[in-house]
Image: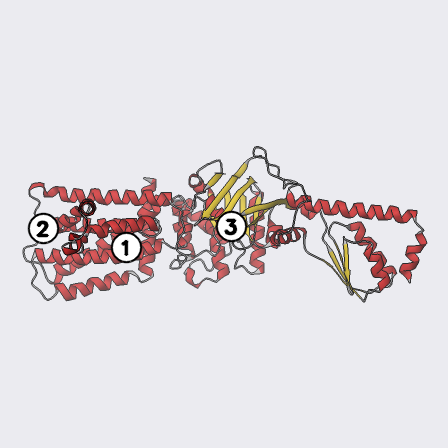
Amino acid sequence: MHTLRLIFRFAAFTLVEYVRSGRALVEAAATIAVYAIFFRRQALDGDHFFALAALFTLALTFYTSSTILGLGDRPQGYLILARRIGRTGYLLGLYLAIILVTAAAYGALSLLVAAFTPVAGLGVAGWLLGSLPLLLNMFLLAALLTLIAPFVLSSGWRLALLGLIALAFSNSLLGGSALATLPTTLLTTIEVLRTMASAPLLPAFSGYELAISRDYSGPAFVIPLAQLSLTLGILALAVYAFARRDLIFSSN
Amino acid sequence: MTLSIEINNLQKAFDGQLVLQDVSLRVARGTIYGVLGPNGAGKSTLLHLLLGFLRPDHGTIRILGRHNPTEALARIGYLPERVRYHLHYSGREYLYYLGELSGLRGRRLAARVEDEIAQVGLREAADRPLRVYSRGMLQRIGIAQALLHEPELLLIDEPTGGLDPQGQEQLLTLLRALRSRGLTCLVATHQIAEAEALCDQVGILFHGRIATEVVLDDLHDIGRSVTIHTSRLPADVQAILAEFEPNVTYAEHEVRIDANTPVLQAQVLRVLIDAGIAIVTLEGQRRPLEELYLRIVHGESIEPPGMPPPRLPAAAPKLHHTGGDTLLRELLTNAEQQATIRNARRSTENSGRGCAATRH
């Protein structure tokens, strides 16, 4: 309970600085701009809204995570980490700040749409059903970006992880005639690695589809659980890695 | 004696380059220990190891009775070198947040924040944003945050950096007052005067090693070398001064007498005065710690040839009579012995010969 309180205090501390420094204006401006460009002039249905909103929130999560993790990767952090909060609290506080900002931006976008261009046939229940996997995808991406932050993973591990992610996305890049010339053993190895690396992406892609369809029939309810589990797993890995490495913040 | 810090054979390398090697030191509770060394000697790395920011490659750290430094963080105050702040807060807000992150709450938090603001003299500026603070004011906020949670141990990297002379004096006075209340302090500094003014014991860190440790009280008892600027020294006076070598060196307008040689200093002054040499200035030269520090930095020997440097025993730390102290005592002994021998020799010779030659 005590650690949780410290995490919330540090998240609040980070958010206050984020807002006062003017960085939050980027999210505000982006939300308004995206609404004005993609949502204001169209007659939207639920599928269209969630398809667009999911892409926007992922892009926003990428930006917000980079910015807030950048705030955490400064020499100022030494003063925080020399206190009772500890490394776990520090990292989770930053993560909490990220998801609060991105969730707030998504909430603001939804409110703008609801207030000025209501989506036909999308009630509160439908919005909640679509928003759950969408938000979980944002949290998942934020966790992954937290894990590969320079102060969390060493450069070697980051490179390895980014290599795996690239391999997972490589279906369209590595294939066809380029692979045909490779020896069968190597080809099989690449296929196995690709399958293994792309497995963690399944909850994310399924979550995206679930947000658009909002169809929880059959085993679909497992998708949010898989998203949540993967997020927690990645966060645990980030906390583990951060707790064990030499802490040398960027001097910029 | 209770130890607040106990480090044994600490080693740390970055990218294969050793930054600290075989560092062992002990800091007794209620004392101020100075880690004195030039930039890049490994002082900040040592502090970061003590705070658990870095992990040692080899060796052990025991801080406030804990082998894991992070378990002791709640009882440690830390002021980094060139500290950077979250500048979008006012001084008071910042201290409130940091106090909360140290586990303080409610009335105690409020009382501690106000006490520290008053203690560092920032009452009027407390509600201004940190971005408008001067460097000295930021250093004061740094001190306030380090003391906010009433730590038992204070780790400070270059404490007076950015402070004006008055601020420096106030800080040193504050730290001495805290020591008198039982606070232990480890100060990393490259300023010899600061170490002399503040510390009970100093370890000189050079090229990642504790080259020597000295107890300041012992050094204070020992004199300083003296340089006498004179009118031109005639050849006959120079011939007399040559008898005092190597503890006395001279040039045409200058005589330099080694530290720890009160008898010799008096003798040389007598020779000069008797010869009618005008003394232009007489100045004490480098302080003993400075002398020792510079010898280490310049790679000169600090121990008598063939004698290994003294080591602190692992179980019962001996804080007195370590390397630098040995050097100075050796100098003192040598000078006094030589003076005694010379006096004895002269007393057996014709006493008038030397004096007559001097007067001419």
- Judging by the rendered image, the residue that carries numbered circle 3 is B42
* Quadrant that contains the C terminus of chain B: bottom right
The residue lying toward the viewer, choosing from B79 and B39, is B39
| B91 relative to B76, above or below | below
| B324 relative to B355, above or below | above
Kindly check if marks 3 and 2 are in contact, taking CB atoms under 8 A apart as contact: no
Amino acid type, callout 1: Ser
Position of B220 with respect to A230 (left or right) is right
Q: Which mark is residue A126?
A: 2
Q: Position of residue B71 (x, y in %)?
A: 42, 39
Q: Mark 1 and mark 3: span between their CA atoms?
A: 34 Å
Q: Mark 3 and mark 2: span between their CA atoms?
A: 60 Å
Secondary structure state at the residue bearing disc 1: helix
Query: Label 2 is found on which chain of the structure?
Result: A
Residue at horizontal 54 percent and vertical 45 percent from the top: B185
Secondary structure state at the residue bearing disc 2: helix
- Judging by the rendered image, the residue that carries numbered circle 1 is A65
Q: Mark 1 and mark 2: span between their CA atoms?
A: 28 Å
* Quadrant that contains the N terminus of chain B: top right
